[in-house]
Image (spheres, rainbow, N blue to C red):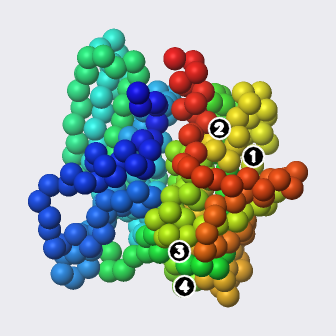
Amino acid sequence: MLGLGKLPSGVLERYVLGRLGAPSGDVALGPRVGVDFATINLGKGYLIVSSDPVTGSSEHAGWIAVHVSANDVATSGNPPRYLQMVILLPEDSSVRTLSRITSEVDRAARTLGLSVVGGHTEVTPGLRRPIVCATCFTYAETYVSADQAKVGDSIVLTKMAGLEGTVILGGASARRLLGSLSVVGEAIEAYRSGGVHAMHDCTEGGVLGALCEMAKSSHLGFRVYEEKIPVHPLTRRLSAKLKLDPLRLISSGSLLIAAKPAKADQVVSKLRSKGYSATIIGRFTREHMVVVRSNGAHEQIRSEPVDELWRLLEHRV
């Protein structure tokens, strides 16, 4: 039986990534585990596109969906431009629920300078909470992707671990973090610095999940240090209360950057000069995915982490 959340990479590779319809020579970067977006070669430049759903939260679903999909496109180093939205509502939903979701979509899109160009809205039997899916796309001349990290690259993390999970679980006390869920600005600034090999936003599985995806897609390992990974005080309180690991908690709003070793400090300085917090938390290695915990223990990651939000929801179900 499949659990809640992201599917194991083996299942994706066998039942999803091997069934992609007619091949096309225009696909420059197709679907693969750990890569945020696809790119289509247009002859003069590329179309960059990504889709993402919000399924674990009914509150702020519209706002989160826009930011999550825009974040994926921005990890290419290019500003997102257009959106398509799919909104699926439970049968007992009110017009007020639809209005709240579309208002959030509109505000988030305006904040990021995105145009909503289409989509689909319906009432769907059997749903327990609304599902909001966003497809974001843009045009670009060049890009980087999450599978281009190199051995020895410094790992830079922006903001803090567990941000989106904190927004979802923290209620009214976490509303002030809603504005932190975008990585669009910092991704573009980091790319412009000229010191970036790869970028990946931290969604399901949190910082550790994103690190695993970057490492596996780049055929590398990593070594990061828990004490260097910033965690918001509210996230720490929630994690202690609910017995969660903040490094495995869904973390949209935090960006992982594989920076050239000689330019990592330059990337961090550029981000900080623009008002974005950024921290070097470790480096990519030839093999083994290792977290050095604050107590000195070396934890080797052997499989994709299950997101703490999904583990909590599954337990409640």
CA separation in Å, label 4 and label 3:
14 Å
Give the mark nearer the N terminus: 3 vs 2: 3
- Circle 4 SS class: loop
State the image coordinates of residue 304 (x, y, percent, origin top left).
54, 48
Q: Check disc 3 and report the residue beneath it.
A: 149
Front label number (4 vs 3)? 3
Give the mark nearer the N terminus: 4 vs 3: 3
Give the mark nearer the N terminus: 1 vs 4: 4
Is the C-beta separation of discs 4 and 2 under 8 Å?
no
Instruction: Place residue 131 in its image quadrant.
Output: top left
Label number found at residue 232: 1
User: Badge 1 local density, few (<14 within 10 Å), some, or many (20+)?
Assistant: some
- Judge whether 169 appears above or below 81 on screen: above
Give the mark nearer the N terminus: 1 vs 2: 2
Front label number (3 vs 2)? 3
Is the C-beta separation of discs 4 and 3 under 8 Å?
no
CA separation in Å, label 4 and label 2:
32 Å
- Circle 3 SS class: loop
Is the C-beta separation of discs 1 and 2 under 8 Å?
yes
Q: Check disc 2 and report the residue beneath it.
A: 166
Label number found at residue 194: 4
CA separation in Å, label 3 and label 1:
27 Å
User: Badge 3 local density, few (<14 within 10 Å), some, or many (20+)?
Assistant: many
Left or right of 172: which side holds 313?
left
